[in-house]
Structures are given as structure tokens and as C-alpha cells.
Image (cartoon, rainbow, N blue to C red):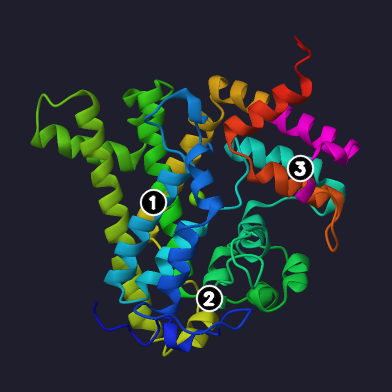
Amino acid sequence: MAELARYAVSADGSRGRRHAEAGPAHRDEFQRDRDRIVHSTAFRRLEYKTQVFVNHEGDLFRTRLTHSLEVAQIARGIARALRVNEDLTEAIALAHDLGHTPFGHAGQDALDACMREHGGFEHNLQSLRTVDVLEQRYAAFDGLNLCFETREGILKHCSRTRAQELGDVGRRFVEGQRPSLEAQICNLADSIAYNNHDVDDGLRAGLLSIEQLEGIELFTRHVGEVRSAYPGLAGRRLIHETIRRMINALVCDVIETSAANITREQPDGLDAVRLAPPLVAFSSVLGREQAHLKRFLHEALYRHHQVLRTANKARRIITDLFAAFTSDPRLLPPQYQGGAPDSQERRVADYIAGMTDRYAIREHQKLFAVDLS
Ligand code: MG
């Protein structure tokens, strides 16, 4: 591995773990974090959680797991090119969606609505709660006991009030500072991954058409290049060749724009990165094009009537489960019944958020199907 830049986070300089542990052998602290995330239960559950399409709708659509792997691949590539910490970047990317509910954003919004009077539900906070508290694997502590820098990177958004309650890991939100470059990279890699794979999945599902996408500059430019280089190419191969070029263009743009920002600001360490404006960024042209693609996907895909129909069912399942479990907590598995310092509602939210799509569907059937035969 190339030598880390002085603005990178180094494992030796980590602010450490909440519970002191002996240092790892043959790997560094962030590699250990990455390994703990891959071995966690929450990580395996991502395989059966919706990204946009519910898991049983087709075998080739992205799930939260394949999404997280694509984010990690894109983020690592950017991190390596900018000579920041690739292992920390990978750990943050693999963990960034661990707190997601079943059924994608419809599930998150429904659970947030259920929790409105009880502190709300936000998947970034839940990802942190998953690695800090909910994973039960180690004898000496709850959670995965990850390093400060990994935990801070997982917490992508946070309100000021929440940040104050969280203490050191939320401090940057209170002080209006930026996170590490490694965390900034993961945020942009997340959007590069989902914008592009949602185009791919939307076309595969027949919910989007190439004709609709012709109005989107990023797509039009690259599909045009492919058509002139390979006249006659059509179908899936035309789409794949176009999307790979779109991803490559966005990744190269982030690397070049961020490298120029870093050269201009000359941050001499993490403290300087925190005080500088966001250094990992798209150029203004590609930033605009990427935002346009994102708006298009919101309208054409995420609000497609077929997607909304599934979202409506998902909302119903989450809302019904929440109502049943909060009105009679005895229906919950014992480990989710009460327990200071959390409210019963919070424990119900933890239980529901941890469910895979199909587990939630089965739980709903068990609780509400009236066929007793
Ligand atoms: Mg994501």
C-alpha cells in the first residue's frame, strides 16, 4: 500500500475504542473493525433487505448487501487514489447501512412515523446503535466496540440535539465541522453507487426506459459514446457498457476534484480537514449532472406506481407490527422486552429495524393472519 498522506487517518493515531482492548496481531485497528463488521449478524441480514426492489421481486436486483459492497468498492478506489486510509474507508462503507429497516426508505419512513412521539427513527443513528449496542457477539462488551473514527464515519447525518446526546462521536455536528476524508469519500461513493445501480435495476425491471433516460446528460453522453464506438450494440450489454462509463466518469471526477481541493487547502492532518470546507467533492459540472440524475430517479423510479404499491404494503406491515408489539410487549421475543435505559418503543423499533423483508412479512402473517387451521 502506498504511504498514507498526512491528511489521512492513521490506525496508530486512532482515538481508540470505548472499551479498552489489547491491540490486534497481523492487522491494524481499522482492519479489525472491517473484519468485525463483516462477521456481524446485521451485515448478513443486509442480504435480505430491500434497496429499492423487495428481495423476492427478482434475484438480480441490488440488495442492501450488494449495495454496500459496491459502495465499498467505489470508496476504496477513491481512497487509494487520494492516499487516505483504505481500510477505514472500507469499514465505514460496509457498515453505513447496517441500521436500515426492511423495505428500504418506505420502511424507514414508516418506522420514523411510528416513533414520532418517542424520539424518531433514523437509519444512520440506527447503524451506529447497531455497532455500539445491538450486536451481541463479544463476552466483554455489547456491540462491536469499533474505533472512534469508524463510528464517527458511520454517523453521516445527525440533528444537533441528537448529536449533543451522543457525546464525542456527535461533536462534529455540534461544532459544525467536517468528518474525515475517509467518511466524506463514503458519502459520495454511496450516491455514485445507488444512482447508477438504480438506473440498471430500473431498466431491468422495465420501470425505466432508455428513451426516458435520454433526457439525462450523464446517461446521454455515455450512451452516445458507446453507440458510436459499437454501432449495433443493444440490450443489456449497451446498458452495462454505458453505466460502467458513468461510474468511471463520476469516480475520476471525484478523485480529480478532491485532489485539487486538497492541494489548495493543504490540510496537514485530520484537525485541518475538520475545519476546511468539504474537500471530497464532484466538480460543478458533474455535481449538477449527478443531481439531475438523482431527481430523475426520484420522480421516475422511486415514485413509479409499482414501487409505490409495494411501499404502501411495506408501510402497512411496519405500522401494524409496531402497533401490535407496543400494545402488548409480551408478543416480543424476551430480549426485546423492556430494559433500561431504553423505552419499550425503542426496543420495538430495534426489533423491527433488524428484520429482513421476508422476516417482517412472516411476522406480520403470524400476528395478523386469522387462519388457525
Ligand atoms: Mg447506502
Mark in front: 2 vs 3: 3
Q: Along the polypeptide, which appears first: circle 2 or circle 3?
A: 2
Vertical arrangement, residue 94 with respect to residue 297, above or below: below
| Res 309 quadrant in image | top right
Residue 17 drawn at (x, y percent) = 58, 79
Towards the viewer: 336 or 286: 336
Vertical arrangement, residue 341 with respect to residue 14, above or below: above
Residue tagged 3: 333
Magenta range is 315-335
- State left or right for residue 251 relative to residue 334: left
Q: Along the polypeptide, which appears first: circle 1 or circle 2?
A: 1
- Cα distance between the residues tagged 3 and 1: 31 Å
Question: In the image, what residue type sits under mark 1?
Answer: Leu
- Cα distance between the residues tagged 1 and 2: 20 Å
**Quarter of the image where the N terminus is located:** bottom left
Residue 322 drawn at (x, y percent) = 79, 37
**Residue at 68% from the left image edge and 52% from the top image edge:** 122
Q: Which mark is residue 149?
A: 2
**Residue at 53% from the left image edge and 36% from the top image edge:** 50
Indicate whether residue 250 is drawn in magenta.
no
Indicate whether residue 316 is drawn in magenta.
yes
Q: Is mark 3 within 8 Å of ligand 1?
A: no
Element type at mark 1: helix
Question: In the image, what residue type sits under mark 2?
Answer: Glu
Residue tagged 1: 69
Q: Is mark 2 within 8 Å of ligand 1?
A: no
- State left or right for residue 306 relative to residue 285: right
Element type at mark 2: helix
**CB within 8 Å, label 2 to label 3:** no
Towards the viewer: 65 or 79: 65
Question: In the image, what residue type sits under mark 3?
Answer: Pro
- Cα distance between the residues tagged 2 and 3: 33 Å
